Image (tube, rainbow, N blue to C red):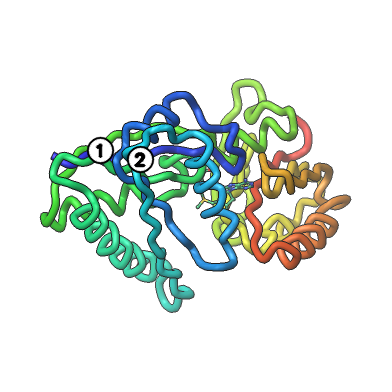
Amino acid sequence: MRKLLVIGIGAGNPDHMTVQAIDGLNRADVLFIPDKGAKKNDLADLRRQICDRFVTNPKSRRVEFEVPVRAEPTSSYRTTVDDWHEAIAEIYEALIRGELAEDGRGAFLIWGDPSLYDSVLRILERVRLRGNVGFELEVIPGITAIQALAAAHATALNRIGDSVLVTTGRRLTEEGLPANAGSTVVMLDGKCAFNTLADKEVFIQWGAYLGTPDEIVISGRLGDVGAEIEKVREDARRRKGWIMDTYLLRKSGG
Ligand SMILES: C[S@@+](CC[C@H](N)C(=O)[O-])C[C@H]1O[C@@H](n2cnc3c(N)ncnc32)[C@H](O)[C@@H]1O
């Protein structure tokens, strides 16, 4: 039976690689490296760097593949994502069948941790349900952008005994901060959703390119730093051609 190792590689710093992740890489015959287009070359490069530095298994080989770009959501976000996942499932199925021997091992190198805002496990489940190829799965956890953010700000995520909500920029814009939110981590925000909040006393701890040489961190009251973050973010995005940022929001008091 084929085996797939789904390996969390950390959030941008090769030093995030765990011993378990390095061991997983070296147990694979084939290392699958996604290419998300010219703008995101740096992300594929990090995966290549990780392989160059940590793979010592001379028998393994790398297979690079293109990931289709998700269409802009039209009527339904879910339908758009569903179509996109189906297209990726077809690619994964072809890779697994075409590149791995019947008893071969393949590794997918997943940004951060596979359990957090990543679709690889859902897509592999789709591949399994299509019924054309069987495989075992082994998941190796990685350091997430959330941990990198907390470390960069030298902060604990939760206040004492309080909850932590992890959400997206889209939801923050639609729903605002929940009344009982202790700490709220926001990911996947292309539009600085924090600036839509009416409460400017909210404290933000923001980080971009966390763990990389380009890391930027800014913190303060939204009223003081909200506009600055938006400008710094836009300048950095233009300079590099892409940006990944994450932030933690806390209401004042408590
Ligand atoms: C598709 S999700 C992947 C999350 C990843 N699986 C993880 O465990 O961190 C991508 C989002 O993660 C966050 N992110 C990932 N890496 C980051 C980094 N190095 N710095 C800041 N944010 C990052 C951003 O919010 C970005 O929009």
| Vertical relation: 211 (above or below) 42 | above
Quarter of the picture holding the N terminus: top left
Q: Is mark 2 within 8 Å of ligand 1?
A: no
User: In the rendered structure, which amino acid carries the disc numbered 2?
Assistant: Val
Taking the image as shown, residue 11 lies to the left or right of residue 128, namely right
Q: Earlier in the sequence, mark 1 or mark 2?
A: 2
| Vertical relation: 254 (above or below) 180 | above
Quarter of the picture holding the C terminus: top right
What secondary structure is found at the residue carrying circle 1? strand
Question: How many numbered tags mark residues here?
Answer: 2
Q: Residues within 10 Å of mark 2 (few under 14, many from 20)?
A: many
Say which mark, if any, is on residue 137: 1
Cβ atoms under marks 1 and 2 closer than 8 Å:
yes
Query: Can you identify the residue that label 2 sits on?
Result: 6
What secondary structure is found at the residue carrying circle 2? strand
Taking the image as shown, residue 106 lies to the left or right of residue 205, namely left
| Picture coordinates of residue 25, whole percent (x, y) | 39, 35
* Occupied quadrant, residue 182: top right
x 36%, y 54%: residue: 63
Say which mark, if any, is on residue 64: none
Taking the image as shown, residue 219 lies to the left or right of residue 212, namely right
Taking the image as shown, residue 238 lies to the left or right of residue 77, namely right
Can residue 171 be seen by looking at this rendering?
yes
* Occupied quadrant, residue 252: top right
